[in-house]
Amino acid sequence: MAAPSLQDGIEKAGSPMKLLWQPNAEPWTPEVVEREYTGWRQEQAAWHEGVALLNLSHHMYDMWIEGPDATRVLADHGANNFEKFAVGQAKQYVPVTRGGHIVTDGILAREGEDKYLLSGVPAAQHWVQYHAEKGGYDVGFVTDPSSAFRPGGADPKLFRYQIQGPSAVELVERAFGGPMPETKFFHSSPVVLDGRPLRALRHGMAGQAGFEFIGPWEHAAYVHETFLKAGEPLGLIQVGALAYTTPSVESGWIPSPVPGIYTDPELLEYRRHLPLFGIEGKRPLNGSFFSEDIEDYYVSPYELGYGKMISFNHDFVGRDALAKAKGETCRTKVTLVLDPDDVRTVVGEGQDPGFVLTYARHRVETGAGLVGVTMQSASIDPVGAVLAQTLIDSEHSAAGTAVTVVWGEHPGSGTDPEADLGFPRIRATVQPSPFNEHARTLYRRDR
């Protein structure tokens, strides 16, 4: 019997929302890595104040795209500029549907003239491979799922270790016996660690300095141990799965927006191609904001802050829709700073709530009613508050604007989306996104 497709799941459930809506869904955290090493508070502080080691080796889905048509298929189905894409450079890949809704982004690294590596949540990978095979592009694919889905418990093909924080450069120089090659932000350079070839990607999280080291899995244990030893005099702290999920809230990246693929009749074949038990069929929706229409959850790359990445110097799927939408975006990405007293009362029942993480879509309101929706909320201990990445109506996006967040779980279909369910409110203040000033200025400028 063939495995069920995404379209099978939608038809059996009755609608995309009936398939995806799961109140009180557990938030995703990276697999395999320890949840905490020294405690999430200390781990968050490490990349703000000292130096942190993060293991990204297990939760990324990698897909190598190689062949004469590699650039063409990526450009035909992505909004990025491919005329300015150097070997060794990485970009946030932005694939969109013909309606201009994002499919979900990924990190695209150019490894050769006709070779790329696309990493992250596998929705973008599914999109590219499907259209490449359907369109007859001269290109091949090699995939490496995340460790939770890799057959037979096999090791990853690559390791990825990030060294982040104010002391990151010093630690790296200790490990390598000297400075890294001069490298632009989000570019990589080949380096050698005791005879072992790696790539050093100039990277940062929450605005802090750092590198991501990538290499063949056979060297993973040695590289990891070398970093631990070099970092010991600097107070290196390993970051666990809980703290790892939180820097995106400061750096302004919204993970895993809903792919805009569930309703277009022209994507029926695509939905029949996708497995039900994949990211598109099993990433849950929940929170106090509920709509029967999945299209109310679709987002534009402009809303996500990706406008500068969009290039109209080539034709691509969704180009006309993005050209039409340019300058007309109704929602703005902001950071909400939730009132700590309200968080203690509502979330912690009068006590310190501890670690808070949710990808719930919570209603954001003013006296005028609904004005926005949260996308990810998390405790940021160095800030002393829960922050929420939020899409909000542009007229309410000015820093300092007072709003409230409706904290609760709508039951889903069968209950009026606008019903007053007695959910508590948390006061919040609008601030820019990214929240971190370095990430908001130098980080975005350098990209």
Image (tube, rainbow, N blue to C red):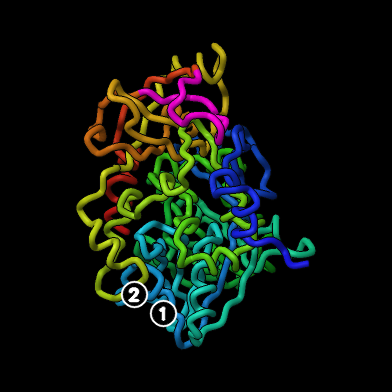
- Residue lying at 58% horizontally and 52% vertically, measured from the top left: 230
Which range is magenta? 404-421
Q: Which residue is mark 1?
A: 71
Residue type beneath disc 1: Thr
Disc 1 residue crowd, few under 14, some 14–19, many 20+, Cα 10 Å: many
Q: Which residue is mark 2?
A: 82
Residue type beneath disc 2: Phe
Residue 342 location (% of width, % of height): 45, 16
Residue 176 location (% of width, % of height): 52, 62
- Say left or right for 415 vs 240: left
Q: Are marks 1 and 2 in contact (CB under 8 Å)?
A: yes
Q: Can residue 250 be seen?
A: yes
- Residue lying at 38% horizontally and 50% vertically, measured from the top left: 299
Disc 2 residue crowd, few under 14, some 14–19, many 20+, Cα 10 Å: some
Instruction: Mark 1 or mark 2: name the one nearer the start of the chain.
Output: 1
Main SS, magenta residues? loop
Q: Can residue 382 be seen?
A: no
